[in-house]
Image: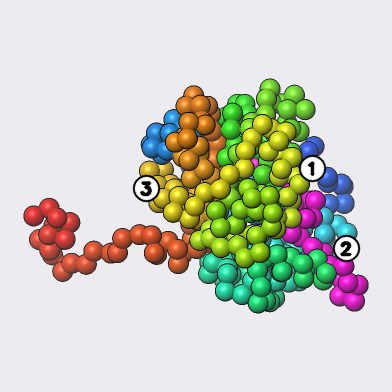
Amino acid sequence: MSLGARPSSSPRPRLLDRFRQFLPLSEATPSLSLGEGATPLIRAERLGLTVGAPNLYLKIEGQNPTGSFKDRGMVVAVAKALESGAKAVVCASTGNTSASAAAYGAAAGLEVIVVLPRGQIALGKLLQALAAGARVVAVDGNFDDALRIVRALAEQGEHPVTLVNSVNPFRLEGQKTAAFEVCEDLGRAPDILAIPVGNAGNISAYWQGFREYADAGLADSTPAMWGFQAAGAAPLVHGRPVERPETVATAIRIGAPASWEKAMAARDESGGRIEAVSDDEILAAYRDLARLAGVFCEPASAASVAGVRKMAAAGALDPDATVVAVITGHGLKDPQTAERQVPGVIEAAPTLGAVAVALGWT
């Protein structure tokens, strides 16, 4: 190669173009993108040995544009809203949906309205929505109350708005593309796909994606879907809604999942399971992900790894199984929890000797 010549490379694929044959797009669908998708799938050997899953991989969805998996579905939902002539979109949120809707709405030139539970949203997510210009309304209630309100807003006709929560089918259509990427990067479907469960749309979307890839002859099998809810917000585990869900994992603090039936179908059809993990188990996995795999995630993301560890300890995991744990969001989404989980900064005078003493070297 001559001096100054550029190495040959292909442009980063747009999600809507890369998987167009699997998406409900038309010639009239705008080509919207913030660079979503194509997130890393990494082998986590040290972490896997620690949690009892030697063949553990992590799907790092926190590397999407707004820092969470929501961007995959939001790009499709907002593009289809534009196609239909929408001028505004609305969502309820525990945080990540609001950040994603605000960003894609801003890129598309749409008004974005967010309704969220007061005092229950991690600071990083709230700031993302506000910075992108969303109109944010905090209500005295939980996520389920917020979702009920935005559904009503979408049904009224005086101020037309398009609902972009995961009850919008275009959201799950976009989110299923992560399953395609897992198969492509592994060269096959994993034996187990472990995933946090809150509103239950993502486990449903992944299962849809794995089935579609297998039906198209692009994968020879489908994985068992293992979903994990926080113990204080585990309606699918208990078989009934939780009126006042509580957990440090704010992204999955949901008591009445909108995709309940789809998630249970994903579990049953795949031969999988949906279990609960405690906040202590979630936070232990949260710390280990950063310290053993170099992956800084928000607490809800760690529910997948916490669940794998719990199942391994119970003897429910074949140590030879290939396991993919979905890491749904970036750690900077929730800086307050991170601050409580890390040791403090060591202070020292600006001399070699003082730093050596601070490090315990002398």
Q: Quadrant of the C terminus?
A: bottom left
Q: Are marks 3 and 2 in contact (CB under 8 Å)?
A: no
Q: Estimate how packed mark 2 is, as few (under 14), some (14 to 19) or many (20 or more) residues with alpha carbons within 10 Å.
A: few
* Residue bounds of the magenta highlight: 154-178
Q: Nearer the viewer, residue 288 or 24?
A: 288
Whether residue 236 appears in this view of the structure is yes
Q: Is residue 223 magenta?
A: no
Q: Residue at (83%, 69%) from the top-left corner?
A: 152
Q: Earlier in the sequence, mark 3 or mark 1?
A: 1
Q: CA distance from mark 1 to mark 2?
A: 19 Å
Query: To which residue does mark 1 refer?
Result: 23
Q: How is the image coloured?
A: rainbow
Where residue 147 sits, quadrant-wise, is bottom right
Q: Nearer the viewer, residue 169 or 142?
A: 142
Q: CA distance from mark 3 to mark 1?
A: 38 Å
Q: Earlier in the sequence, mark 1 or mark 2?
A: 1
Query: To which residue does mark 2 refer?
Result: 85
User: In what element is the residue under mark 3?
Assistant: helix
Q: Residue at (42%, 38%) from the top-left corner?
A: 51
User: In what element is the residue under mark 1?
Assistant: loop
Q: Is residue 177 magenta?
A: yes
Q: Estimate how packed mark 3 is, as few (under 14), some (14 to 19) or many (20 or more) residues with alpha carbons within 10 Å.
A: few
- The picture places residue 162, in percent across and down from the top left corner, at 82, 64
- The picture places residue 252, in percent across and down from the top left corner, at 60, 57
Q: Earlier in the sequence, mark 3 or mark 2?
A: 2
Q: CA distance from mark 3 to mark 2?
A: 47 Å
Q: Say above or below: 143 vs 76.
A: below
